[in-house]
Image (cartoon, helix red, strand yellow):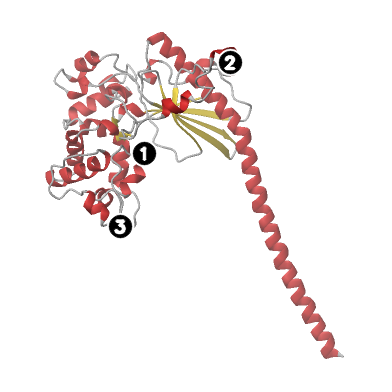
């Protein structure tokens, strides 16, 4: 009997242990589910605040654009748009707005070999290495590009890849494409396949969007290097003027209203003085915080006559007009003009949104503003 009781006790103990383990696993799973649900709920609550702050910011930017004819720099007075508009977030929340002048970079779709060479040599690459890297990237982006380096990759090199393919012959749509470009992938990625310092410097120097001339008001050291400006004194003068440092500390952050203004500061022979002064693409980052929760929207906007998405030239016949002629919404017949005008309305929005992301990785901000 004592042996039977001992077996029963052992079975009960084992059952209790398994039940405890199952209960612990259930509680842990339930805790994780509740945490995910709480984060989703917090995101939904903060999203509305972020969108409201973004719309307020856009309204302030449009007011300044209408008054001045263009946007040039937050130093014009719109650096703290929410305070300007008298925007008040809900109690317990903090809203921050950050601006990054995307047009303070080179437009990658319009880049020249000379710009690449200046920049790559500033990074420490030799003349031959800079030429080879420039040829690799330009050969990837441009059809019928004629390289200057004898060892530059061509179609045959890509056809010998494990999975053969042809270079697209169009501008990059993502900086991740650098990992596919022969020669470039060895320069911009480390041995483990992760982006290295050169990759980050490349991203800071170039924009994926199309515009003619970069803005001097958003210029960085990478932009100056690409222009061939190696004079550290000129670089410091420009940086001090834009950020209100050094000899310009008392006047605060400044901006150039015209290339002539830049020439007065930097000299008429400086290539920087030939840059644009208008913002062609502006990144707006709105971050809402409430306790430990946060939500962020990242929007890249283009003002009228600003940056555009690169147009890919193809040899195929454009059938869009033929298709649209068969669409009664795009080409209404006289009999349905009245009804179409009532149902189809054009949103007269002052800016073009080139990118829009939520809770992405935060880029390096240049000019913070808060409310």
Question: Would you name the residue on which mark 2 appears?
Answer: 336
Q: Nearer the viewer, mark 3 or mark 1?
A: 1
The extreme top residue here reads: 67
Q: Are marks 3 and 1 in contact (CB under 8 Å)?
A: no
Question: Would you name the residue on which mark 3 appears?
Answer: 191
Q: Are marks 1 and 2 in contact (CB under 8 Å)?
A: no
The extreme right residue here reads: 1
Residue 151 visible in rendering: yes
Front position in the image: 155 or 120: 155
The relative height of residue 77 versus residue 228 in the rendered view (above or below) is: above
Q: Is residue 10 left or right of residue 115?
A: right
- Picture coordinates of residue 210, whole percent (x, y): 32, 28
- For the N terminus, the quadrant is bottom right
First in residue order: circle 1 vs circle 2: 1
The residues tagged by marks 3 and 1 sit, at their Cα atoms, a distance apart of: 24 Å
Q: Residues within 10 Å of mark 1 (few under 14, many from 20)?
A: few
- Picture coordinates of residue 339, whole percent (x, y): 61, 15
Kindly indicate the quadrant of the structure image that contains residue 294: top right
First in residue order: circle 3 vs circle 1: 1
Q: Secondary structure at mark 1?
A: loop
Residue 341 visible in rendering: no
Front position in the image: 103 or 53: 103
Question: Would you name the residue on which mark 1 appears?
Answer: 173
- Picture coordinates of residue 72, whole percent (x, y): 35, 18
Q: At 46% across and 28% down in the image, what residue appears?
A: 323
């Amino acid at each position: 009997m004592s042996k039977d009781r001992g077996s029963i006790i052992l079975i009960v103990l084992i059952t209790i242990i398994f039940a405890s383990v199952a209960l612990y696993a259930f509680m842990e799973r339930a805790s994780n589910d509740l945490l995910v649900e709480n984060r989703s709920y917090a995101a939904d609550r903060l999203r509305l605040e972020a969108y409201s702050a973004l719309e307020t910011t856009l309204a302030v930017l449009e007011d300044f654009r209408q008054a001045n004819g263009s946007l040039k720099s937050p130093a014009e007075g719109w650096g703290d748009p929410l305070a300007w508009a008298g925007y008040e977030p809900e109690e317990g929340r903090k809203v921050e707005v950050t601006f990054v002048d995307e047009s303070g970079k080179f437009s990658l779709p319009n880049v020249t070999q000379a710009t690449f060479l200046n920049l790559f040599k500033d990074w420490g690459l030799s003349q031959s290495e800079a030429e080879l890297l420039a040829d690799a990237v330009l050969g990837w982006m441009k059809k019928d590009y004629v390289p200057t380096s004898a060892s530059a990759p061509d179609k045959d090199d890509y056809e010998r890849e494990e999975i053969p393919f042809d270079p697209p012959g169009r501008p990059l749509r993502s900086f991740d494409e650098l990992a596919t470009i022969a020669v470039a992938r060895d320069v911009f990625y480390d041995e483990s396949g992760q982006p290295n310092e050169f990759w980050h410097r490349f991203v800071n120097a170039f924009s994926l969007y199309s515009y003619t001339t970069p803005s001097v008001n958003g210029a960085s050291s990478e932009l100056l290097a690409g222009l061939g400006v190696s004079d550290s004194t000129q670089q410091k003068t420009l940086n001090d003027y834009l950020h209100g440092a050094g000899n310009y500390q008392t006047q605060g952050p400044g901006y150039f209203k015209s290339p002539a203004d830049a020439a007065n500061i930097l000299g008429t022979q400086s290539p920087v003085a030939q840059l644009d002064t208008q913002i062609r693409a502006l990144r707006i980052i709105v971050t809402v915080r409430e306790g430990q929760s946060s939500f962020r929207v990242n929007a890249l906007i283009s003002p009228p006559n600003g940056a555009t998405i690169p147009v890919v030239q193809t040899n195929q016949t454009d059938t869009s007009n033929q298709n649209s002629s068969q669409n009664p919404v795009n080409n209404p017949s006289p009999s349905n003009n009245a009804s179409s005008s009532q149902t189809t309305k054009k949103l007269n929005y002052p800016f073009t949104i080139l990118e829009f992301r939520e809770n992405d990785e935060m880029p390096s901000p240049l000019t913070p503003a808060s409310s």
